[in-house]
Amino acid sequence: MKIELLSVIGLLLCLLIIGIEYILLYRLAELQDEHTARNDNIRRRLDIHVEGVLYAPTEGSRNAEITALADEINGDFTVYEMAVKEIKEHQGSGFDDEAKEKLIERINTQVEPIEMYAKMLDEGDVYHKGYACRRLADLEAMEYRDKIKECVGSKDRDLAYNAAMALCQMGDVYEVAEYLLSIENDTQYSGRIVNEFFAQFTGDREELAAKLFEKCNKYMKCTVIKTIAQYKIDGFRNMYIEGASGNDTQLKIACVKALAAFGYPEDEQILQIAAGDKDWVIRSSAVRGLSLLKTQSALNTVKHALGDKEWWVRQTAAQSITRMDISPKDLEEILGGYDRFAADAMKNVLYKTVDT
């Protein structure tokens, strides 16, 4: 009897839980519908206001439409961004990008988006603070840089990242360097962040890299060298030459990649030596760099790399050959030679080149 009673009680509890879940799901669906309906209403009203702003017959009526649009926005950043997006994406005649930007500037005069995002930075939750940091940077609100700096030290990882990225857009060397140094031991995270930050950095990339090199560990140093290789910063060439000639494999990989990006004739000897290194990543980078030199000795080394035991090096060599001044005789020699590795790698690249 006791077991049957417990079973009934258990069944009732299960039904109660299912009922509560159903009510919650129903309420969530209602809220979603209300949110969708609200956005649809806002969008319809915005369409009217934006059309009025774009096609007002006189400047007086355009000013009136801008005021009406500002009243519709009423300090709501989501509505403001919807309006700006709609103007930027407008495809009508007579409105190039410059004309659209001028209209947005006039709207900003009344809406005051900087003050709107500044308020969000002061009063918002962690998510909204991070978003405000990025938007203030987009609007070049340099007067709020100090407040953004305070967020870089946040224990919340996303807020710290967004604040540091905002400072990156503002070109703040010291704060960005300090943030990157603070995450250098998180190797799965910091590598990606370094690439993002140098791509977005508006200040002097050489100065930022130098600041990092003063204090960073070996992993961060190698990551920064590989990242800035594409920017061909001459100020670090001596460091690259030293690293490419050293015994530290990871540093050598980074430095050979950096030297390879320059394509300077005076670096050919270093790249020739690196093309024979025991590490295939170093050999591959060296071969790619030699392809920029266009000398016969460089061509010979790249041709030799077509027979490398590592597929990636052969592939790099084949791609590099197509960028060099190779004669028909040399090409015939590769394709018809005894080295099938070299011939296959070359054919593969040539087929892809023809297909594209």
Image (cartoon, rainbow, N blue to C red):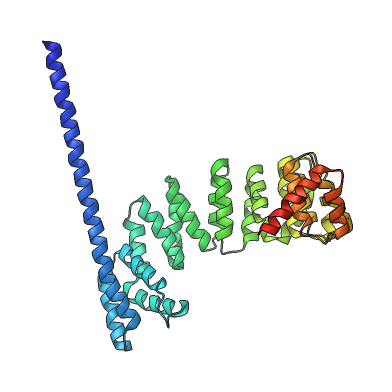
Residue 157 visible, this angle: yes
Q: Can you give x and y, in whole percent of width and height, for residue 1 in the image?
A: 10, 10
Residue 256 visible, this angle: no
Of 356 and 150, which appears nearest the observer? 356
Query: Taking 155 as reference, is 182 left or right?
Result: right
In the picture, residue 54 is in which quadrant? bottom left
Q: Can you give x and y, in whole percent of width and height, for residue 312 in the image?
A: 72, 44
Query: Taking 347 as reference, is 337 left or right?
Result: right
In the picture, residue 263 is in which quadrant? bottom right
Q: What residue do we see at 29% from left, 72% from top?
A: 47
Vertical placement of residue 199 versus 284, above or below: below
Q: Can you give x and y, in whole percent of width and height, for residue 57 in the image?
A: 31, 88
Vertical placement of residue 275 versus 299, above or below: above
Q: Residue furthest top?
A: 1
Query: Taking 120 as reference, is 286 left or right?
Result: right
Q: Give the position of the C terminus as an image quadrant.
A: bottom right
Q: What residue do we see at 58% from left, 64% from top?
A: 203
Q: Can you give x and y, in whole percent of width and height, for residue 134 in the image?
A: 44, 60
What is the number of callouts on the image? Answer: 0
